[in-house]
Amino acid sequence: MKKQWLVPLIVLLLIAAPVYGFIRQYLVDKIDHPVAQHGVIDLRQWDYSTNGTVSLNGEWDIYPSVFLNPQDFQNGASAKINIPAQPIQVPQSWNKVMQQNGSSAFGYATYHLRILVGDQQQAERLYGIHVKNIRTAHRIFINGQRVGSSGTPGTTAATTVPNNVPYNTWVPIDGNTVDLVVQVSNYSYSSGGIAYPINFGDMTAITKEREISIISDIAVMGGFLLPGLYVLILYQMRRKDQTLLYLGFFCIAAFLHVLTHGEKLFSMISPELSYELVLRVQLGCSVIFYYCLLFYVSKSLPNVAHVLVLRSYRIMSIILLAMSVFTPTSFFTQIDQIWFLCNLLTIAYVIYIVVRAVIRKQPHSQSMLLSVHSLAVVAIISIISLRGIIDNTAIIPIEVLFFVITQCLMIGRQFALSFQQIENLSQQLLTLDELKNEFIANTSHALRTPLHGMINMTESLIEGAAGPLEDKQVEQLIVVSSTGHKLAALINDILDYSKLKNGDLLLDRKAVNLRTVAESVLEIVSYTAAGRQIVFIQEWPEYVPPLYTDEDRLSQILYNLLGNAVKFTEQGEIRFIVEVGAGHVTFAVVDTGIGIEADRYEDIFKSFEQGLGLSEQSYAGTGLGLSITKKLVELNDGQITVESVLGQGSTFTVTLPTADVPITKEMINTVQPMTAPPEVKRSISKSKPVLQREKEPLINKEDELSHSHHTQVILIVDDDPVNLRVLNNILSLQQYVVIEAQSGKAALDKLRYHPKIDLMITDWMMPGMSGLELCRQVRQRYSLSELPILMLTARSRPEDIQNGFAAGVNDFLGKPVHAIELRARVNTLLELKSSVQTVLRTEMAFLQAQIKPHFLYNALNTIIAMCSIDPDQASELLIELSQYLRRSFDFQNRDQLTTLNKEIELIQSYLSLEKARFDERLQIVWDVDRELGQMIPPLSIQPLVENAVRHGLMNRAVGGILTISIQEQQNNLLVRIQDDGIGMAPEKIPALLAGESTSANSGVGVINIHKRLLAMYGQGLHIESTVGKGTTISFTIPGGEVSA
């Protein structure tokens, strides 16, 4: 409990001690201080050498609204002045005196004071005065001699040139009386007159006082400027810490405040500055000063200040800054006293914030309380000064400077603590990093042994250790082997990274045949490029001397460079070029891939850096390959360089020293035995893409589509051939027909040529077109139920899932994929599509059942009536009726689409019957391009035609015109059925499409067609109607199937 009160007690002492000491010293000094009375001050007993200057405070004489010259006060002339003298206290504003004389703060007047200096003073002794602040223009006379001025006083605002800067002036005095006359005018400030004391003394005392004042101001200014610049520089390095910004501007504002107050040193730096500009700067600095103070403390002690107070203060500060720029000085100086009270309230609120934070025991609150005491001292001194108890406020800038210094020390302490914390965390991270490296190394060692066992066993099976294998079995094993080598290379990179970091990597350098190692690596890398349109080209000189290097490390270098080229090349060439130089061999890997930006050449050789900063991370990897490659090359006394053009490809060039051994033909031609089948060897030797047979399963599966109508078809999309093979194997066991595509573009081509695909499974991360973009492209043509999409992804963030669903994904499956879960998800989506198709078939059957019995009755009656009148026409109508009935029931329930011509023939049969019945009442206009080969949903147009005839035209006694328009528009099929019948109210259309209409004439099949179009294409019927004018029903079928 005692410790909790220790800091507040210290703060109270720090507040009371300087206030008491300053006031006591001021009052003690004032006890024997001469004071003017009735316009006379007696300084005959004042010792200037001991006591220094004396302030000419007290009761002066003032003559409002008149300029009197020194001659008016000499030899009894003052008695002849018609205007009586009025007493006024100096220093003090003249506003009250001027108002008593019918004037205001604006006007002009003459001050007069007689100073008695005594006979004991030496003759012709230099006396001077120190003028501080007389508003806003004045002229001073001593014993009839003009000794100083600031600005040009005048009797009107037009003749007055305002200015107000401190200065010293001296004059020789040979008598015992000094007659002081001051002519003052003010038309710029809200208060005028002698605002601060005028000090009087001999030349030595006056000079010493001014020098002390100037040095004090310079010291205080430096105390504000240097910390301010320092803090702002820190803010440039730590932009997130806004407290530094506020404290920096607080110091700069305080610096400008001191520069334009006190001795007003700006007048020494730039004397041509106008008084009006200085007043604007003073107000602006004051606003910024208190604004930054409040927000600095509130940011340093968060969640303590009230948000409403901060917002209100921000608005008030903006208004005041605008006033300081755009309003006249005579206007904004009127609020001096109000602004002074606001500043005191600001200081009080700052103290309240700090005390509240101390009570809440917030971090750094007690340190802030120790320094904020200086602001309390400022507030107390200001209040005492405002009450007139003292007129000296010299302690205020010193206390503010103390606040700034303590804040800088506090920030420095925070930085020191942060740095110490960072050092501790860094040491912990280094320890954890060593543990991590040790764990990775141990894990990699544990993985490498069983992995190499798997690779060796797989290769032995390929070579026939367990008997002859079928071609497909060999292909599967080759994929397993190449995947194992790829994983082994990654494990080697991880092990080497740990060794390189610890400096433990040892090289077994000897003479190594480059061609043997290169062709072995090319064979493995070629498997990973299977399915891509990549040609491998090797360019060898006649003889290549052996390299002096580590054979395993050389293999690792080649694998990383060639694997990198394959990863970033979708199609084109990868060249392996070898050149022989003096004492070295240079080989280059040249690809036609995506290239690298020039400013990233250095970055790609850093650990965990990717070749491109792609947001989709389409080419994601560990980021270790090139970093380790560079270090391995340098350890072998070689060098590696890169050249690249973005979008055109990259060239990695490696130079290694040759071995100092004789070159033999046997050495050069020694080739490591290959483990691949003979055709693979030939592909590599001829520098062509390998594993062409990888495409055979794809072709065979696509051929099955033409022979099967019941097997479900699945399209799988992935840029990794191994992943495609794994997915194909899992799904093929379920008797699905699987089609493969290695890019988004290829997948769109498959969908274009094979529209009967039931499900698409795609990876998210693919170069070029990502899986997300592929989904967006697919959804432009297929609905969610028409073609379900299963997305494979390692992303699990909610925003990624949300983006996927927005792009049209039906379901997600995390990687790595488990066979059981994959089959379950696939089965669910296929069942979903099957269920939707069943619903559509049911609706089709319902639509077919909607042929009304009275339509058949009316059609038969019409035919019977025609038999006696025109038997031939009756026969034709009977044929049309039979064709209409046959076509209505001829649609296969399993078919979701029919040809446009079939639908038109159905419409023609129907209209032939209705035309025979209604004759001239029914007029038909055809606007149909019969060359279009579009596939459309069955019974999607004829019910709309029937609806127009029955409910639109025939409800009019005179009938009307039916217009049928079917045209291609911007690669889409636009169908429009228009009649000039009775129409309907527009407000009924939404209810009709929603199936909420209770009218008996709500339309034959309109709702059914609208729902089917929405399910298949995402857009349904568009209806426009006007009562008495007719109705237009239209819909659009997206392009892709339109062919003329």
Image: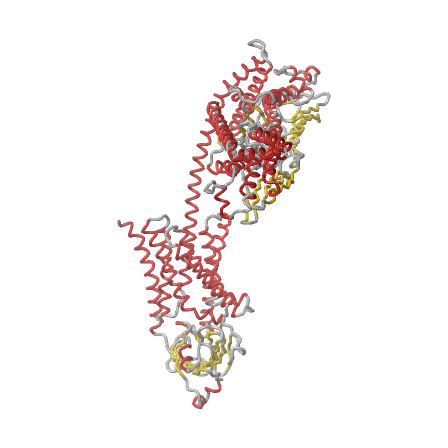
Q: Does residue 380 show up?
A: yes
Q: Does residue 609 show up?
A: no
Q: Residue at point 46% right, 81% down? A: 110
Specify whether 512 is left or right of 850.
Answer: right
Depth check, front residue: 783 or 814: 783
The percent position of residue 766, horizontal first and vertical second, equals 57, 32
Residue 965 falls in image quadrant = top right
Residue 343 falls in image quadrant = bottom left
Quarter of the image that includes the C terminus: top right
Q: Residue at point 56% right, 28% down? A: 891
Depth check, front residue: 631 or 449: 449
| Chosen colour scheme | secondary structure
The percent position of residue 713, horizontal first and vertical second, equals 55, 25
Specify whether 216 is left or right of 669.
Answer: left
The percent position of residue 93, horizontal first and vertical second, equals 42, 75
Direction left: furthest residue: 1
Eyeballing the image, is 786 above or below 671?
below
The percent position of residue 379, horizontal first and vertical second, equals 37, 63
Direction top: furthest residue: 467
